[in-house]
Image (spheres, grey):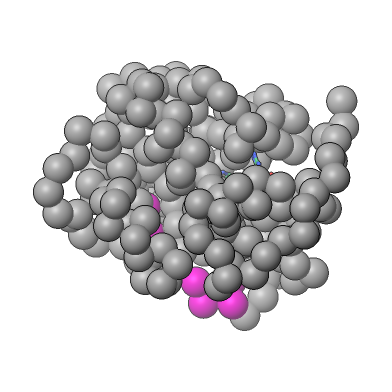
Amino acid sequence: MPFQRPSVPKLLHPRDITLQQLVTQTAHAFRMGPQIHPRRAAYEFYPTPPEATRALLSAESFDGDIWEPACGEGHISKVLTEAGYSVVSTDLIGYGYGTPNRDFLAERKPLAKHIVTNPPYGRGLADAFVSHALKLTRETGGTVAMLMNLAGLCHPIRHDFYIQNPPAVIYGLDECTCWPYGNPRRTTTSIAKQRYCWIVWKHEHTGPTEFRWLSTRRFK
Ligand SMILES: C[S@@+](CC[C@H](N)C(=O)[O-])C[C@H]1O[C@@H](n2cnc3c(N)ncnc32)[C@H](O)[C@@H]1O
């Protein structure tokens, strides 16, 4: 069944609203059309190079099944599966992998204990994914691991959120680029310049956030 787009309210500029409002409005972002900006990939499809997930698994393990709620072509799911995890893979769009037509932001029940993904960015979508993943895993006690843009960590709009929801650990990655549609030839200057990190939240975590460096090189 094709994805149905309901009508949406006008989007406010992120500068003018609180994070909570941003989360609410961005739940509607793709219901307006496949591209949040003409230079962005449709549905924010920027697949994760496998070495980024292998690097994560060299440092983190998960005691149960994992949900990849924006699985795309399965770049993360396949690495998790190869490592022996039971993985539930869903996505808003059908790429021939996992279950399509599942809007993560509309999910009301966790489909697995842990959540690992590289979420869609832009218009606060990544923020909405993080907030929703933390909400859903509160029920399961699971870990949330998100591949995020490193610069986004220090944006004023997220300051209070990170203080109130401190990650257990952040892994800064040395070499990782998520090309549009997985194709380096379709890149833009800003994508080529992006730096990425895995941000990991654990509900039992207390104390300060640990920052670690992780190299993808030996996992290529
Ligand atoms: C950055 S890509 C990453 C794909 C995959 N996680 C990976 O790492 O290779 C973001 C993905 O989010 C999906 N997506 C966008 N909005 C979504 C939503 N509301 N619910 C579920 N998936 C969504 C896109 O279709 C796309 O596959």
Q: Residue furthest bottom?
A: 189
Q: Residue at x 60, y 28 (%)?
A: 107
Q: Is residue 162 left or right of residue 115?
A: left
Q: Position of residue 192 (x, y in %)?
A: 56, 74
- Find out whether residue 192 is within the magenta segment: yes
Q: Which residues are magenta?
A: 190-198
- Residue extending furthest toward the left: 207
**Can residue 61 be spotted in the picture?**
yes
Which residue is at a point 44% across and 52% down the rendered structure image? 147
Residue 205 left/right relative to 79: left
In front of the other: 45 or 112: 112
Q: Is residue 155 left or right of residue 104?
A: left
Q: Residue at x 64, y 52 (%)?
A: 26
Regarding residue 152, the answer to whether it shows in the image is: no
- In which quadrant of the rendered view does residue 191 lie? bottom right
Q: Is 142 covered by the magenta stretch?
A: no
Q: Position of residue 173 (x, y in %)?
A: 35, 61
Give residue 27's position: percent from left, percent from top. 65, 45
Tell me which image quadrant ligand 1 sits in: top right
Q: Is residue 130 above or below residue 63?
A: below
Query: Residue drawn 26% across and 34% down?
Result: 203
Instruction: Estimate the x, y position of residue 180 in percent, counting from the top left.
Output: 67, 61
Name the image quarter holding the N terminus.
Answer: top right
Q: Nearer the viewer, residue 211 or 133?
A: 133
